[in-house]
Every structure is written in C-alpha cells, then in structure tokens.
Image (tube, rainbow, N blue to C red):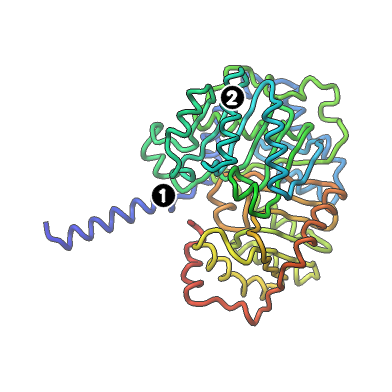
Amino acid sequence: MHPLIIILLTLFGVAVLLWLVFGINWRSSRNYERKHRRLHARMQAEDTEALQRLLFSNSLTMRIEQRFRPLAMLLAKDGRPSVAASEVEIITSGRRKHDLLIGDILNAKESIHMEYYHFGIDKSSRRIRRLLMAKAQQGVKVRFINENIANWPIPNLYFRSMRKAGVEVVNFSDSRFSLLRFLMTLSYRDHRKIVVIDNRIGYTGGMNINDHYFYQWRDTHLRLTGEAVASLQYAFLDTWLAAGGQLNYALVNFFFHLDKPSCGQSLGTLTQVTPDDPTSPEPVLLTAYEWILNHAQKYVWFQSPYIAPPPSLISAMRNAAQRGVDVRVMVPEHCDTAIMRPINKSYYAELTEAGVQLYVRSGEFMHSKTIVCDDYLSCVGSANLDFRSFGIDYEINTFFYDRAVALQQKQIFENDLPICRLVIAAEAHPTPWQRLMRHLAPIV
C-alpha cells in the first residue's frame, strides 16, 4: 500500500477516534433516562410517600425569599432533589476537613459512601484508605466510587487491596460494559466530591483526597447534617448504580430522615444539593449561573481555580455589570496544571472588557468554587467556571438560601482580597500562545 494512503488512513482513524471521545453531545432526554434508569427503576419499585416528601417536596421552597424561588424550582427539575433543611459548616482549611472526616469515619457504625474525582496515594490518602478498610472489616458497609480515568497513575493493586478488605469498589468508567461506549464517554469525568456516613453526615465541595488539599492549598468544602444529606445520598446512589454497583437493601434503608416526624419540616439552613451531568437535557449549573447574574440586584462574586467560561456566561456577566451589578471573579495567580495557566490568562481581557472585576490571588493555589449573591444566595461546589464543568464532567453544587451563610461566604471572599491584585484591562491582552491554548479549553 502506498505510504500516502497509509498516512491518510491513519489520520482518518485518529480523527474518528477524537470525534468519538470529544465530539459527541450526549445531552438529550433519552440519554439522561438511559444513564439513570437503574435508580429510576428502583424508585418506581420501592417508592414511598415519605421518600417522595424527603427528596422532592417543594414545601420548603415557600420559605425562600420570593425573588429566588424560581431558581430553586429550576434546580429541582428533571428529578433532582428539591430544597431541604440542614446544618452546615463551611470549611476553608484542609486540615479542618481532614480532622473532621477522620473523626466521622472512625465513628461510623453502619455505612460509608465515598465518591471523589481524585483519591491520592500519598500519606493522608493512605491513612484514609486504611481506615476505610478497617471499618469494612468491622462490618461497616463501605462503598467507594473510583474515578479510574482521572486516577489512572494509581496501580490497580491499590484498589484491589481495598476490595480484599471488604470495601465495595466500582469504577466510574468500565470498558467491560461496552468498549465503544467506553471510548465515546472517555472524556467525561466524575468530578464530584461526596461522602455520606451513616446516612446522617455528608461532605461535598471542592476538596479531593490528597495532601495538596489537606495541607497546601486554599479550598472550600462543606460538612452537612440534616435532611440535605439525603440529597447527597441520592446523588451517590445514582452514580453507584449507573457504574454497576449493587444495593442489597431497599432504598428506604439509605435515608435516615425518613423515620423522623420532622421530615420536610425541620428548621435549618435552606439547602439545595444539585447534581449535573453531560446527559442532562439542559446544562443545569450553567443555566443557574446565568439566572443568578440576570436576577442579581447588588453583586455576584465568584471564586474559581479555572476560568474558560462559555460565551453565554460572559454575556450574562456583561449584562449584569452594565446594570450596575458588582460582578467579581477571583482566580489564583498560579494554576496547578501547566495547560490551564495560559487558558486562564487568555480570558482576562474578555472578562475585564465585560465589566468584571477580576482579582488574581497570590499565595497558595486556590481551588475554591463558590458564589455569593446579594447577601442571601450562595453556593459551594465542584464546578469550575469552564467548559468542562458546564458541559462534560459530572458535577455537584450546593446552593444555600440563607442570609447568615451568604454573609459568611462574603467574608471568606473578602478575607482573600488582601493578597489579590485587580487586573487592569490594559494589561490583560492575551499572547499568541495563550490564544492558541484557549482553543483547548472545551476538552482539557
């Protein structure tokens, strides 16, 4: 065969492979139903009035300030949990999260569910791994979702030892189901961070499991108790079943608050745990962010380690700024990955020209993904201000409709300002290299 033909066939094969991995848009009602069918089937077979009330009742929505109620209803569409009451601790210290999580694992009596984008192999990660194995050997049901593509450098033996100790481990992406489907969804990552312990305590936010998050970086995470934990549990069980995990108990056994007379009526912070994934008919979190910008009256402040916002979000920022809304975005001076550094900087000019006050934070790497708006609405999550979080990855954000929580998050933002510099539009023009790297933003 002529060498030119071989080259052309090779390039064609590479192009087909790249299209399979990066080129397919899975957003449709059919794909959404297919992805979540195992949980939906269990819900249909085992549904109870109490379970519906706990997860999907809109009764607490009426306690939300009126102008934010449409947002709560939007986030609750397509079978996502509605507003719940909870007690919340906002965690900005990795050491604090480490100590709290270790203590809650040690005290676990019934179950530990864990789902992380990155679960490391360093000192703190190994300690948590040993604790999970020890609790499994004590009879606690430990279920662990391994984001096996993101964690590919970690040897299989690391997780095989967990299985031998009794930890139930499933891989988020598994080629054994279908090699073609595996390739077609290879770019999609489980970027969520979820822990549910004894169906009563939940963790979620920006922090993964490794020494960077616990000891070196600045991040924001949550520890929740109360009925909002049921929403975290629901999201975990959905992913667990979709990844091939098994549940040997009826669903009602995974929701502690079902047997509480205060179910759906308890006092606490109004909280809405919101999962998003690339098969959702709509980009839920992107739509929510645009809604917030379009309805803000005074200010919207964002923190994100990475910025590659879609054009529609930049447009919403511009429109808000032109209405006199104080729109701020805080990003770290230095990124943890070389590829994101020029991508971040390539957006400086566009954001500043849109009227955004762009703050670049020095010091340790900031990995927080937060929003605070008008001293009432706030959010802590796993989603970055970039294409991947809004369209490709599986994410989970927690929204709060509460003045005290919003003021706390506002203070956290202000505490970071002294080590920030405000980017001036004149200095923000991207270099040719940054413009080139920007084209990779939708896929990296």
Secondary structure under the numbered disc 1 in the rendered image: helix
Residue in view at x 47 percent, y 40 percent: 148
Marks 1, 2: nearer the viewer:
2
Type of amino acid at the residue the image marks with label 2: Ala
Image mark for residue 21: 1
Q: Is residue 109 above or below residue 378?
A: above
How many numbered marks appear? 2
Q: Is residue 289 above or below residue 436?
A: above
- The answer to which image quadrant residue 253 occupies is top right
Residue located beneath label 2 in the image: 134
Crowd rating for badge 1 (residues with CA inside 10 Å; few <14, some 14–19, many 20+) = some
Q: Provide residue 291's location: percent of width, then percent of height.
A: 72, 55
Horizontal side of 114 relative to 67 (left or right) equals: left
Q: Provide residue 378's location: percent of width, then percent of height.
A: 78, 51
Secondary structure under the numbered disc 2 in the rendered image: helix
Q: Earlier in the sequence, mark 1 or mark 2?
A: 1
Quadrant of the rendering where the N terminus is positioned = bottom left
Q: Is residue 216 above or below residue 310?
A: above
Q: Provide residue 431's location: percent of width, then percent of height.
A: 51, 77
Distance between mark 1 and mark 2 Cα atoms: 38 Å
Type of amino acid at the residue the image marks with label 1: Val
Image mark for residue 50: none
